Amino acid sequence: MSHIGKTMNDIYLSIDLDYWRYLTNPNESSFDLLNVLSSINIDTTVVNSHEKLLASVNNSKCTTLINVDFHSDLADDNPELEFNEGTWVNFVKWQTIGNYIWMYPNHFQCVENQGGLCHCENFDPFVDKYCGWKNVERRLGYIDIFNEYILNNIKAIGITTSYDWLGDEQFNASYLSKLIKCGKKQSVRNKIGNSFNHKIKLKDVV
């Protein structure tokens, strides 16, 4: 585990379902991840576009943001930066004291081919480090989330369905949003593996 991983606490876990567009590890199932998270009884906010999580992140009183996402959502440190789904991480109000970790699915597609990068070519916040955050890091895969230390320190969860980016994960997002809209705690073992037994706040899921 990295230096950030050893020191982070009060974690906000952000998950964008577009993560599953290009997997390096085919064993990283969205159902498996949602199954684990559904068992730890943490308030979850669901939105249809990532920037809509900002208020939830800002109000969370967390000090670490983990973003499981095909895109980094971290752009240039520019005072004139436009706020949108690809820059919202730059607008987290506690970033100067916080850690940001981007967990991405495929190194070639996301980094080498730059498909997941949201910054300009002349500035890489994960290399140059100066981007407003105290610490930034990127990691291939989300396996570290299953670390007991990380699971025990997750304080809030945000899920973004991102229909425009999904590809093959369209079913996952559709099923997830329908389940939440119904507000049911019924078992979904055949789909996700457990009941959503924690409080879910629905924001603009369509």
Image: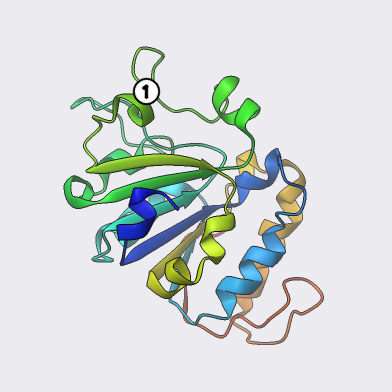
**Residue 18 horizontal side relative to residue 53, left or right:** right
Viewer-proximal residue, 82 or 66?
Answer: 66
x, y percentage for residue 168? Answer: 77, 45
**Residue 160 horizontal side relative to residue 128, left or right:** right
Viewer-proximal residue, 54 or 73?
Answer: 73
Circle 1 residues within 10 Å: few <14, some 14–19, many ≥20: some
Q: Residue at x 57, y 53 (%)?
A: 142
Residue 58 figure quarter:
bottom left
Does the rendering let one see residue 177? no
Which element is circle 1 on? loop
Q: Quadrant of the C terminus?
A: bottom right
Q: Residue at x 35, y 47 (%)?
A: 100
x, y percentage for residue 91? Answer: 26, 43
Q: Residue at x 43, y 70 (%)?
A: 149
Q: Residue at x 47, y 81 (%)?
A: 199
x, y percentage for residue 182? Answer: 63, 78
The residue pinned by badge 1 equals: 124
Instruction: Give the colouring mode of the picture.
Output: rainbow
Does the rendering let one see residue 144? yes
**Residue 10 horizontal side relative to residue 93, left or right:** right
Residue type, numbered disc 1: Asp
